[in-house]
Amino acid sequence: MPYVNIKITKEGASAEQKKALIKGVTDLLQQTLGKNPKSTYVIIEEVDTDNWGVGGETVTELRNRAE
């Protein structure tokens, strides 16, 4: 029973994109490891960019500086 937790920044991933991620990961586990799709769980967590840090800075800070 695979459990996959995908964490992405909360920046507007559409319902269709999330659906594609869930299907793609499920298909990959089935094709690669022979896992049953009916018992494969895929969770997508969206994290605010203020709560995601890289190199000592928040993603919000990094994105603002890149603009």
Image: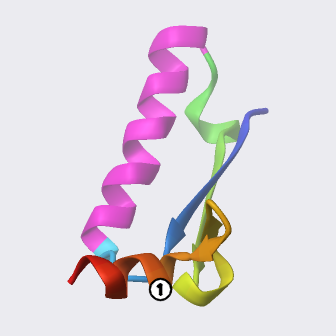
Q: Indicate the amino acid at tag 1.
A: Thr
The extreme right residue here reads: 1
Q: Is residue 45 above or below residue 32?
A: below
What residue does disc 1 label?
60
Task: Assign the C terminus to one quadrant of the image.
Answer: bottom left
Q: Residue 12: in sight, yes or no?
A: no
> Which residue is rendered at x = 60% and y = 79% of the image?
47
Return the residue nearer the eye: 7 or 57.
Answer: 57
Q: Is residue 50 above or below residue 42?
A: below
Magenta residue span: 16-34
Q: How is the image coloured?
A: rainbow
Task: Judge whether residue 26 is colored magenta.
Answer: yes
> Which residue is rendered at x = 35% and y = 79% of the image?
63
Return the residue nearer the eye: 18 or 61.
Answer: 61
Percent x, y of residue 13: 33, 75
The extreme left residue here reads: 67
Percent x, y of residue 37: 57, 34
Task: Judge whether residue 63 is colored magenta.
Answer: no
> Which residue is rendered at x = 36% and y = 61% of the image?
19
Q: Determine the image quadrant of residue 53.
A: bottom right
Badge 1 local density, few (<14 within 10 Å), some, or many (20+)?
A: some
Return the residue nearer the eye: 20 or 35.
Answer: 20
Percent x, y of residue 12: 32, 84
Count of marks, rendered view: 1
Q: Main secondary structure of the magenta part?
A: helix
Q: Is residue 63 left or right of residue 55?
A: left
Task: Assign the N terminus to one quadrant of the image.
Answer: top right
Q: Residue 41: in sight, yes or no?
A: yes
Percent x, y of residue 62: 43, 76
> Which residue is rendered at x = 67% and y = 83% of the image?
51
